[in-house]
Each structure stands twice: as structure tokens, then as C-alpha cells.
Image (spheres, rainbow, N blue to C red):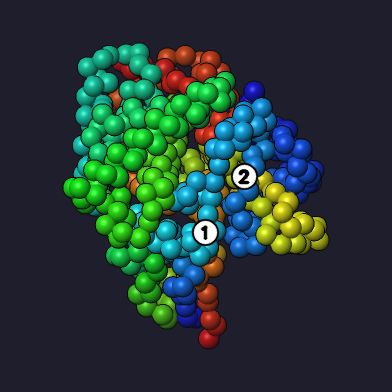
Amino acid sequence: VRADPFAPPDALSELREDQALRRLRYPDGHLGWLVTNHALGWSVLTDSRFSTRASRCPVSDPEKVAALAERGDDPVMSGFLLTMDPPEHTALRRMQTGRFTIQHVSQKQATIERVAESCLDAVEAMGPPVDLIATYAAPLTSLVLCELLGVPSDDRRHFERLTAIRSDPGATADEDQAACEDYRNYVRGVIEAKRADPGDDVLSDIVAREELTDDELAGVALQLFGAGHDTTATQLAMSVFVLLANRREWERLSSDFSMMGSAIEELLRYLTIVPLAPVTRRAREDVVIQDVLIREDECITVSLGTANRDPEKFERPDELDLTRDSSGHLALGQGRHMCLGQHLARLEMAIGLKALMMRFPTLDLAVAPHDVQMRDEAAIIFGPEVLPVTWS
Amino acid sequence: MRVVADRDTCIASGMCMLAAPRLFEQDEEDGRVILLTESIEPSDADAVLKAVAHCPSGALSLLGE
């Protein structure tokens, strides 16, 4: 349990001060490495001698992993960018990047604003108190994703169900398996629909190229749905949470939206919602970093949260300062796997925060900050389970 | 000071355009870097240094005078 829900666990921060590169025993017994500072984290993530085909997670429940392995459920899915290396990764990513450029994403501004306002209409009609995640952060990002991928808005239940199970470390291997199966059937249906009736979206683009197998197309769809909703929803909810817990910052941003650009980067840096689990690489050859030999096939995990609070990189790192220059943070990753949808996430954050502040200037937490129930540390994305808010 | 971009290495993150929108654009087709100018005015030097330093693929480099 974290003493401060916005800061990385103290034990990890202490490692950074003590020895930022050290051995880490993974749950399956593998002896690898853990990086906790910014400079080494950056260099590992941008070094092509490290592969993402690690198939290993520093905090997963080994019994669950074993149960999934017995069923032959390979965690390396075809078409899934995060488990691919060049040249296949490069080719597949380039099929999608045109839809995620700053220019292309900015054309979606009106769509996102419309979705945000309609969610807020529903919140207002409901009246206080509400859970801001279930009523705003989650529907906003899910419905924007449905619009951008050209699927009916009802479809959000399919991808939200798998994410909920994946975010619940108490879920059994059977539940995980069943949710995966449902999800795979769903995305196969989506791909068939795009083949029959192409739309103006990234999935239709890739289907129309006729270069990928159906399994690869399913992987692409899985990644787009999976990476595109809970991440931004959680970042938005955590941002509202930290701003309300530091009321002056809420007032400061509400009174001057020109600082939104730097505020979003600082909220990304300060909150860093990706915990240890997904940021593991494997050495493809012997690599020496800082006079330490990382042997071929050894895994190395980067702690993004402590890297983003590294005093060597950021002055007064534990202070939330919405006007500072936070560029160079690792909250969206680094290197060739850096978040594909990062500019979409930024735009959703900017629109989502501004619309909320304008509609409910008196918004406040409905419980004390320390009573906000947080997800388990082993969740893929760290954030509140629910965010009870009220207004007058 | 001149900046050069290696489009084979570029992963189309758009970080350069975010840091220095006067100098970089993203290709409409696949998002890869487009240099709007090669020679850098002194007023843009800081933004360019940031763009080069934050490029996730190492596709950008600076050449001196």
C-alpha cells in the first residue's frame, strides 16, 4: 500500500537513491535487473539491444502465469506491437502512425468535445455525489475510442470487461481466459465488419491493405482497444484526484487554461500511472551499462514512477508544479515502443479537464483523499477504483 | 547549426513537432518526420535541442557550423 497514492512506493524510491541498477528476482525465479532512475531508464528503453519479447512480469502471480501457460495461451500475440521487435514492429507501427499524428488527432477535437459535453450532461442530470470514473473518465475515453475506430458505442462493454479483469489481481485464470475468449470473438467480428464495410478509421486502413493474417489483425485491434481507454481514463481520473487534493492547483489551472500544455505533461510525470508490470525488456546480447554486464537473455525492468521523480532529472521532483517544463518524462515510455496514441491521450486530457472545470467549478472530493480506494499495486495501470466527487 | 533527420529510423512519435512545431511536421501518410527547414535560427535553437534530445528513435542529429 502506498502512503501517498500519487507517489511511487517508498521502497522503490529508496532503491533509486541507494543503487539505481540492481538484481531483481522475478516471480518465476529468473534473476534479472531493476532500474529505478531516469538516466538508466531512458537508456534501456532507447537501446535496440533490448527486446520487448520478454514474456516475463516482475509482479505477476506465478500460479496464474503457470495456469495460463499450461493452456498454451502464449502471451506473445501476433499483431501486438508491444511484444514485437524490428523489422516486423517497424512495418506494423507505420501502418498505424498516420492516424495518430498531431495533425490527424487534432481533427478529432470537435468529436471529443461533443462526447465530453454529453457525458457531463448525464453527470449533471444525475446530481451529486457521483463516481467520476464510471460517469465521466471511463465513458469519455471509451466512447471516443468507439468513434475513432468506427464501432457502435455499445461495444465498449466488450473491451471494458477484459480490462476490468486484467486490472483485478484477484481474478482467476479461468475468468481471464473467458474474458480473453469473449474479446477475441468480438474483435474478429469487428474485423469482418471492416472488411465488408470499410470506414474512415485505422482498422479499416489495415484490413484494406490485405497484408496481415486474421490473427495479426485481431492482435492489432486488441492493442488499439486495450491501450486506448483505461490508460487515458485513469490518467484523467488521477489528474482530477490530485488537483482536488491540492485545491490551489485546481484553481490555478481553472483560471488560466493557457498552462494546459505544461500541466498535462506535469500530471503525466507526477502521477506516472504505469507501474512496474509492463515495462520489462530482455537483453538480446550481452550489454554493458554503467560498467555492469547484463547478460544475453536476462530481463530488465524499468520503474517509470521513480525515474519520473528522479532529482537528478527534475528539480523538486515531489512537488506538483503545473507550469514547469516536464518534458523528457517517461510516463508514455521511450524508444520505439513509446505510446502510439500519446497525442490523442493529450488531447483527451486537455478537453476532458477543461470541460469538467468549466461545468463544475466547485467540484470537490466527496471523501477524504486517503479514503479513495486505490487499485492493487499489481494492476497494469495504477489509479483509483472509484472517485467519489460532489459539487454545489 | 543544421539538423538532419533519418526517416528510416524515425518511428513517427511526433515528439519533434511537439517540441518545435516551426521546424518539424509529420508526414500525412505514416507520420514520419518532415523537416520544414534545415538551417536553424538562433531563436529556435532551444526548441531544436529539445527535439533532438527527446527523439525516441535517435532519428534526429545536429551538425555544427
Q: Amino acid at mark 2?
A: Ser
Q: Is residue A386 above or below residue A14?
A: above
- The tag on residue A55 is 2
Neighbor class of circle 2 (other Cα within 10 Å; few <14, some 14-19, many 20+) is few
Secondary-structure class at tag 1: helix
At which x and y percent is residue A138? Answer: 36, 29
Cα separation, mark 2 vs mark 1, equals 18 Å
For residue A45, say whether it is visible.
Answer: yes
Disc 2 with disc 1 on a shared chain: yes
In this view, the residue farthest toward the left is: A197
For the point 63% across and 26% down, the residue is A2
According to the image, label 1 marks what residue? A336
Q: Is residue A222 found left or right of A285 in the rendered image?
A: left
Q: Quadrant of residue A36?
A: top right
Q: Amino acid at mark 1?
A: Arg
For the point 51% across and 49% down, the residue is A82
Neighbor class of circle 1 (other Cα within 10 Å; few <14, some 14-19, many 20+) is many
| Number of residue marks | 2
Q: Earlier in the sequence, mark 2 or mark 1?
A: 2
